[in-house]
Image (cartoon, grey):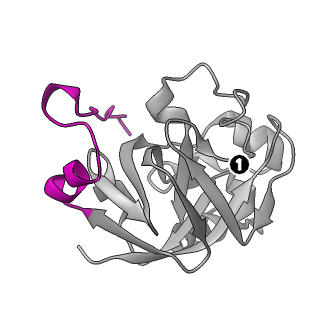
Amino acid sequence: MDGGVLTEIWLTSEAAAPMRRVPAAQLLAGRGLEGDRYALGGGTWAQYPDLEKQLTLVDVADVAAVAADAGVPLTPGDTRRNLVTAGIDLPSLVGRWFAVGDALLFGAKRCPPCTHLERLTGARLVKAMVHRGGINAAVFAPARIAEGAVVRPVSEEEAARRGAPTGADRPVPRIVNG
């Protein structure tokens, strides 16, 4: 699997508030994107397990496909995902280590769409997004990231060298049906 690129960064400090695009941001270990609702301890899904609520990623081509299927003008920011990527198969990163720039992340689970997103956008998106909702990830090594950063898989060996938990302490992804 080859790498991809980070095309957009989105965040909001409050649940259900409009997302705003930033050219660069800090990823915080164990928390997510600095200034984002989940890193601040809030957000609609704040009760979810720590590994699953830190960060969300979606593919720009999937957003375009969802917009076409749903017949609505959908932008990456409308999906309420934090990081927008191009050129990398995000679902294949679930259960694996990967890097965004110098940050080390772990793919925690697929991020299926929800009716909350439909309420906020006013568009019927669940069916069109069911296999194109992106992934949830956890941050293990912090770094400042910027649009244009490389997104790439990281081997278990490289992740361990960078301080990732191994053996019985290694994170386990949650498989979401659908």
Q: Main secondary structure of the magenta part?
A: loop
Q: Residue furthest right?
A: 17
Q: Is residue 169 left or right of residue 6?
A: left
Closer to us: 95 or 130: 95
In the image, residue 112 above or below residue 98: above
Is 175 colored magenta in this rendering?
A: yes
Rendering quarter of residue 42: top right
Residue at image coords 64%, 25%: 46
Q: Amino acid at mark 1?
A: Arg
Q: Residue furthest top?
A: 47
In the image, residue 122 above or below residue 86: above
Range of the magenta residues?
Answer: 154-178
Is 161 colored magenta in this rendering?
A: yes
Quadrant in which the N terminus appears: bottom left
Residue 26, image x and y in percent? 63, 56
Residue at image coords 53%, 60%: 58
Residue 175, image x and y in percent? 31, 34
Quadrant in which the C terminus appears: top left
Residue 153, image x and y in percent? 28, 64
Q: Which residue is mark 1?
A: 124
Secondary structure at numbered mark 1: loop
Residue 17, image x and y in percent? 86, 42
